Amino acid sequence: MSNLRNVSPETFGKVTLLCFTLFWFIPITWQGLTRTSPPFSPKWLKPLFGVSGMFEYGPAQWRVFFIEFRLENTLEPWSQVDEFTLFAGTPLGKRSRFQRIMAMIKAKGNENDTQELAAWISRKLSPSPSQPISIRIRQVAIPHRLFLEFDSLGALYREAMARNLRSLILCEYHPTASDPVSTGVKP
């Protein structure tokens, strides 16, 4: 221990830099460039270097879901609903709980869940039972650069519709007189 006290700060800095370069920078660079583990590293260290190729390629497009509405039995164009009026936002970014719910529904592949969600949204948005609102849930493939350009999903929706981006109608819900009245409970 007394020998370490006699080491100058310059020597300590040089040794630290050498260790960093030999034991972290070179193996990570090797892994990133050759897509193989460094042959000179111990077997137990190899998983630590795998992080260098973790996010090599990003998706070309992001899947974004939009809620559209119009009064039932009208020929009005569909309009976008601000999903933050119905669903809580996430701590980071411009997504809401609706985006997470739809991603889970799509992963499960259950169309009935999408219909139930659309029915709930319709009940929440209808001003009265005599004025039912039809709901449509649309999935749009948004190029990631376009997604990052806009601050709100409403502006993104308008731009996606103006550019006629590839989209898919996941469900279209038309309320009937036998549908239950809103309970005021969020899904």
Image (cartoon, helix red, strand yellow):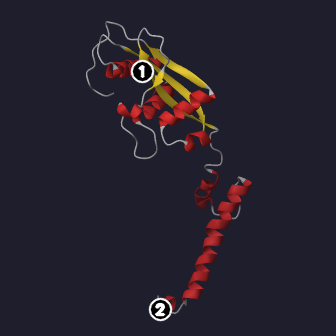
Residue 2 - label: 2
Q: Nearer the viewer, residue 180 or 45?
A: 180
**Identity of the amino acid at label 1?**
Asp
Q: Nearer the viewer, residue 14 or 106?
A: 106
Residue ID at (48%, 18%): 171
- Mark 2 is surrounded, within 10 Å at the Cα level, by few (under 14), some (14 to 19) or many (20 or more) other residues, namely few
**In the displayed structure image, the side of residue 57 where residue 89 appears, left or right:** left
Q: Position of residue 11 (x, y in %)?
A: 59, 87
Are dots 2 and 1 in contact, CB under 8 Å?
Answer: no
- Furthest residue in direction top, as rendered: 177
Against 26, residue 115 (above or below) is above
Q: Earlier in the sequence, mark 2 or mark 1?
A: 2
- Quadrant hosting residue 87: top left
Residue 113 - label: 1
Report how far apart the C-alphas of labels 2 and 1 lie in the structure.
69 Å
Q: Position of residue 132 (x, y in %)?
A: 35, 13
Against 130, residue 7 (above or below) is below
Residue ID at (49%, 43%): 151
**Identity of the amino acid at label 2?**
Ser
Q: Nearer the viewer, residue 31 or 96?
A: 96
Residue ID at (64%, 52%): 53
Q: Position of residue 185 (x, y in %)?
A: 27, 26
